[in-house]
Amino acid sequence: MSDEKRQVSRRQFLNYTLTGVGGFMAAGLLISPVRMAIDPVLKHDEGGDFANAGIAIDDITADPQRIDWTIDQVDGWYESEVTRSAWVYRNDDDEIVAFSPICKHLGCVVSWEGNDDYPDQYYCPCHDGRYYKNGVNVPGTPPLQPLDVYEQEERDGMLFLGKIQPHEEA
């Protein structure tokens, strides 16, 4: 037997080198799309998305009042402060209710008692949309769904609001 080492030709060396470099380049190009596809799946929901709405629990009355607060929003590398709004009141069972002010018809902003013809209702000025105090849409008006509600919790006597959920009619 001979212990001769097998020599690599110049052509084989270049072929191996170019294949390796091409493989590294392809891997580098594929990292971003693969991460974009996998990252949202692996991201866990922390459940800590509640923000201080800036109103004390004791200050919430039976009449809906509009509250505005800001949250820090991160879009990629861009951070900004976004203002959120809600209509907050205590219902007949003394439970706190927080509605989104966005009309379910065309996304305009509703206001409480916004029209003198319809007292004790939320009113959307875009197409005369109306909602009862409990957030349910008035039949025969443009909105076909009730106002969305905010998740909520109480901490240290303050109201904290979270994600918007669809309104479940009772």
Image (cartoon, rainbow, N blue to C red):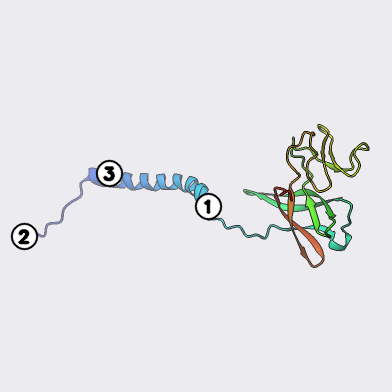
Of tags 3 and 1, which is closer to the observer?
A: 1
Residue 73 coordinates in the image, percent (x, y) = 69, 51
| Secondary element at tag 2 | loop
Q: Is residue 28 left or right of residue 88?
A: left
Question: What crowding class fits label 3: few (fewer than 14 Cα within 10 Å), some (14-19), or many (20 or more)?
Answer: few
Answer whether labels 3 and 2 touch (C-beta < 8 Å): no
Q: CA distance from mark 1 to mark 2?
A: 57 Å
Residue 63 coordinates in the image, percent (x, y) = 89, 52
Q: Is residue 111 above or below residue 141?
A: below
**Type of amino acid under label 1:** Val
Q: CA distance from mark 3 to mark 2?
A: 30 Å
For disc 1, the marked residue is: 41
Q: CA distance from mark 3 to mark 1?
A: 38 Å
Residue 157 coordinates in the image, percent (x, y) = 82, 66
| Secondary element at tag 1 | helix
Of tags 1 and 2, which is closer to the observer?
A: 1
Q: Is residue 46 left or right of residue 124?
A: left
Q: Which residue sits furthest top?
A: 127
Question: What crowding class fits label 1: few (fewer than 14 Cα within 10 Å), some (14-19), or many (20 or more)?
Answer: few
Q: Is residue 79 left or right of residue 136?
A: left
Answer whether labels 1 and 2 touch (C-beta < 8 Å): no
For disc 2, the marked residue is: 1
Q: As rendered, which of 15 and 84 lies closer to the eye? A: 84
For disc 3, the marked residue is: 15
Q: As rendered, which of 31 and 21 lies closer to the eye? A: 31
